[in-house]
Amino acid sequence: MGRADLTTPNLLLLVNLSCFVALVLFATFGLAAAAASTTPSLHPEEVKALKAIGKRLGKKDWDFGVDPCSGKGNWILEGDEDTGFASNVTCSCSFNNNKTCHVVSIFLTALNISATLPPEFSKFRHLKLLDLSRNYFTGSIPQEWATMKLEVLSFMGNRLSGPFPKVFTNITSLRNLSMEGNNFSGPIPPDIGKLINLQKLILSSNAFNGELPPELASLVNLTDMRISDNNFSGKIPDIISNWKQIQKLQIQGCSLEGPIPSSISALTSLSDLRISDLKGRGSPFPPLHNMASLKTLILRNCLIDGEIPAYIGNMKKLKTLDISYNNLTGEIPGSFFKLTKADFLYLTGNQLTGSVPGWILERNKNADISHNNFTWETSSPIECPRGSVNLIESYSASANKLSKVPACLKHDFPCSASPEIIFINDRSFYSLGKRIFDVYIQGELVLKDFNIEDEAGGAGKPIVKNFTAVVRRHTLKIRLYWAGRGTTGIPARGMYGPLISAISVVPNFQPPTVDDNRNDLIVVVGAVSAAILIVLMVLGIMWRKGWLGGKISAEKELRGLDLQTGIFSLRQIKAATNNFDAENKIGEGGFGCVYRGLLSDGTVIAVKQLSSKSKQGNREFVNEIGLISALQHPNLVKLYGCCVEGNQLLLVYEYMENNCLSRALFGKDATCKLKLDWPTRQKICLGIARGLAYVHEESRIKIVHRDIKTSNVLLDKNLNAKISDFGLAKLNEDDKTHISTRIAGTIGYMAPEYAMRGYLTNKADIYSFGVVALEIVSGKSNTNYRPNEDFVYLLDWAYVLRERGSLLELVDPDLGSEYSSEEAMVMLNVALLCTNASPTLRPTMSQVVSMLEGRTAVQDILSDPGFSSINSKFKALVNHFWQNPSQTIILSSNGPNTDSLRSNIEEAEENSQLLRFSSVQSEV
C-alpha cells in the first residue's frame, strides 16, 4: 500500500514535471536557434564574388572564415589619411527583413595592387561606392560594369588606358567620378551629358584630346570639375556658365585657348579657381567681381593684359593669389593691403610698375614679385656672402629696378636646388608620377614640356642637357617653369613641379684680372658664351654628386636601394627645426636626437638626427630608409623622406602628437603620462598586432623588427598606435630561420632563444609583443616593476599570478572597475601565449589579431621543457640589467657562428659576470 502511494501520484507528478522541463528546454533552444537563424549574413552570390575578386587581386588577408559583413577579421581596416591606405568592405543588412546583407561600399586604396579590374564587381547589385585609388591596375574597364548602380567611383592613380569608357555613360546614378592620373586618351564622348547627377568629375593627368563637348552643359549639378594636364583643343567653352553650383574649377596646362569667357562671372559659388597656360591672344582681366567666396585664385600665364582690378583686394577669404606670367601693367592695387589671409602672393613675370609696398615683405612669407618693373629704393647696400644668391631670391624681387645690387651677383656663380620628391621604378602607384616643366634660359624657351623620366628612359637615371647662353650685364637667368602638367595626386596630393639637381656654369673665356670697379666702367656691350650643364635626375641625385664627405659609405649603400620616399635638403630641415633648436627637441635615442619641425607647407614633422657617436649609424640609417620606404600601413609610422648631406644623416617622419607608448603608460608626471581608458588600450594593442602582422605576413617584403618595445610604439593625435624605429630590422628571407652573429634588441623585450643563441625568426617579435601587451594591461614597465626581490621582471610575476589563478591582479589600478574582466583575461592570456619560452609554441601575429578581435578562442598556454635551461640563463642576463631597463644591446660574436657567444654565457654564469657588449646605447 505504501509502495503504491509512492509510485502512482508521485509518478504522475514526475511525468508532468519532466514534460514541463522538456517544453522549457525546447522553447529555449528553439528561440536560440531561431535567433541564430535570423542573424543577417552576406548573400551567397556576393560571397562568391568576393572570393573571385580576392583571388584576382591577391587579397590573402580576406578571412572567409567569418562573414564579410560581421565587421570582424580584416574586412574593415582603419584607414590612414596621410598615406590614403584603406582596405574596407562594408555592408547594409536591412534587406529581406534584416536577414540578408549586401555589400554597399568597397575601399581598396594605396595597396599597390597590380592587376586588371575584376568584372566580378558587377555582381554587387547594391554597391554604391567603389574606390580603387593609388594602385597599379592596368587594362581597360570591364563591360560588365555597365549594369552597376554606383554613385561614387574612383581609380585615381593607376595605369588604366583606352578611350573614355562608354561603360560609365550608362551608370547614370554616378555622383562622383575620378579618373585622374591614368593613361586614358581620345575625346570626351558626347554621351557624358547623360550623367546629369554628377557633382564631381576629375579627368586630370590623362591624355584626353579634342574639343570639350557641348553636352557638358547638361551637368548642372557639378560642384567640382578638374581637367588639367590633358591635350584638349579649342577654346574654353561658354557652357561653363551652366555650372552654377560649382565650387572648384581647375583647367591648368590642358592646351586650351583663351580668352577666359566672360560668362565665368556667373559662377558665384567658386572657392577654388585655377586656370593656367592658355594659348591664343591677349585679353582683359576676366570679370570675377561677384566671387566673394574665393580662397584660391590662380590665373597663371593666361595672356591677361591691362591693370589688376582693385576688387581683388576685397576678396577677404583669399589665401592664394597667383596671376604671374601675364602682361599686367600698372601698380599693385592699394586694396591688396586688405588681403590679410593671403599666405601666397605671386605677381612675377608681368609689367607691373611703381614702388614695392613694404607690407608685402613684412606680411607675406611667400611673395614673388620678380621680373617686373618695380622700383625699390634702399638706404644702404644689400650685402650677401660671395657665391650666394639667396638674399635677393629669398624676396623673389629679382629683375626689377633695385637701387642697389648685391655684390655676390656681379660674377659667374653656381647654384643648386634640391628635389622635393622622387619617383621610382616599380609596379606600384609611386612609379606613376609625372614631372613635366619648361626650361627658359635668358628668357628663351629651350625645353618645352620636359618630362624627366621619358627623356632619361626611366626613373633614377641622369639626363644631361647642354646649352650656350649669352651673359649680359652680369646676369644669367635660368627659369624652370611648371606649366600645369604632370600628376598632382601621386604619391600624395601636392604640386610636383620642376626638379633640378645642379646647374654648372662654365665660362669659355679668360676673365680679366682688373679691379671690379674698373670692369664696371669699361664694359659697355659684350657677348660672352657659356656652357650651361643642367643635370636633371629623379632618384638619389643629391647623393650621386659626392656632397656627403665622410658619409660616402652611406651614399654607396643608398644607391642600391629601391627607395619609395622623398629627399630633403639640409637647408629645409634646418629651417623646419629652427636650426635644431633645443626647444624643438622631443626625444633622444641610441642613434641620436629627435626634433619637431614645421615644413613650409605647414606639415608638422619629426626629424631623427643620427648621432655622430653611433658606430652602427650608417648601417642602421640605410636599413631604416630601405625598409620603411617599402612599407605602407596605418599602424606603421610614415617616413616622409631623408637627408644625407655633409656629415648629416637625417630621417623625416610624420609627427606623432602623443609621443610614445612608454611615455603614455609610465610617464613620471601628468604632462607625460596619459589617462588611457580600457577601449583605448585595446585599440593600441590591436594596432600594434596588426602592424606586426603586416610586416611579418602581408607586405611584399617580410621583416623582423627585432626591437619591439613601448618606446618604439608611437601614438598619433587619436591615440592610434604606429610602430617605429626599423633601424635594427632584418629581412625575413623566405620565412627561413636566420642565425645572426650580430644580436640587437632591448633587455626585457628580447626573446630568450634570440638573446642566448642568436636564433632569429619573427617569433622574436611576437615575444616582444607579448611583453608590451602585459605592460599595456598593467600600466607597469616590464623591467622596472619588481613586486619583491624574488621576481626579476613583470613577466615573472605574471606567470606566478597565472598559477595562483589571480591573473587579473595585473590590471592597472588606475582603471578602477572601468574595464571588462573577460576582455582583460583575453589580452593577458594572449600576452602569456606570445611570451612562451618555446618559439614554436608562440602564435603567429595573424593568429594574435584573430584572438584579440574575438574571432578565435585563445589557445592553451603550453611550455616546452627543452627551453628551461635557456630560460634560466636568460633570466640571469635580465637580472643583471634590470637596473638599466632601457638599454638597447648589440652583441657581436667572434666567428661565423654563435659558439663563442654561448661559451661566454656559460662563463658568465660561473663567474656571476655577464657578456661584454660591443655597444650599449640608451633608448628613450
Image (cartoon, rainbow, N blue to C red):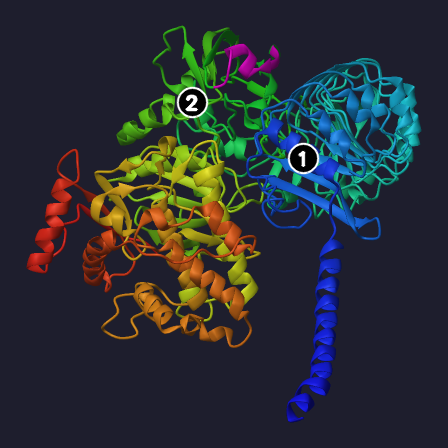
Q: Position of residue 490 (x, y in %)?
A: 60, 29
Q: Pinpoint residue 570: horizontal percent, then vertical percent.
A: 41, 36
427 and 264: which one is in front?
A: 427
Front disc: 1 or 2: 1
Q: Which residue ends up furthest to the bottom in the rendered image? A: 2
Instruction: Give the Cα separation between the discs numbered 1 and 2.
Output: 44 Å
The residue drawn where x is 56% and y is 63% is: 679
- Which residue has dot 2 on it? 541
Relative to 631, residue 14 above or below: below
Q: What amino acid type is highlighted by mark number 2?
A: Ile
Q: Is residue 454 magenta?
A: yes
Q: Residues within 10 Å of mark 2 (few under 14, many from 20)?
A: many
In the foreground, 735 or 11 = 11
Tell me the residue at 79%/17% (across/down).
Answer: 256
Quarter of the figure that contains the N terminus: bottom right
Seen at 36% across and 7% down, the residue is 510
Q: Is residue 606 left or right of residue 362?
A: left
x, y percent for residue 233: 80, 13
Magenta region: which residues? 447-459
Identity, as a three-letter code, of the amino acid under mark 1: Leu
> Which quarter of the picture shows residue 651?
top left
Say which element carries label 1.
helix
Callout 2: SS: helix
Classed neighbour count for the residue bearing mark 1: other residues with Cα under 10 Å, few (<14), some (14–19), many (≥20): many
Image position, residue 817 (x, y; %): 53, 76
Q: Nearer the viewer, residue 518 or 920?
A: 920
Asked whether residue 262 is in view, the answer is no
**Contact, CB < 8 Å: mark 1 with mark 2?**
no
Pointer 1 or 2: first along the chain: 1
The disc label shown at residue 50, or none: 1
Q: How many marks?
A: 2
Determine whether 30 is above or below 842 in the image.
below
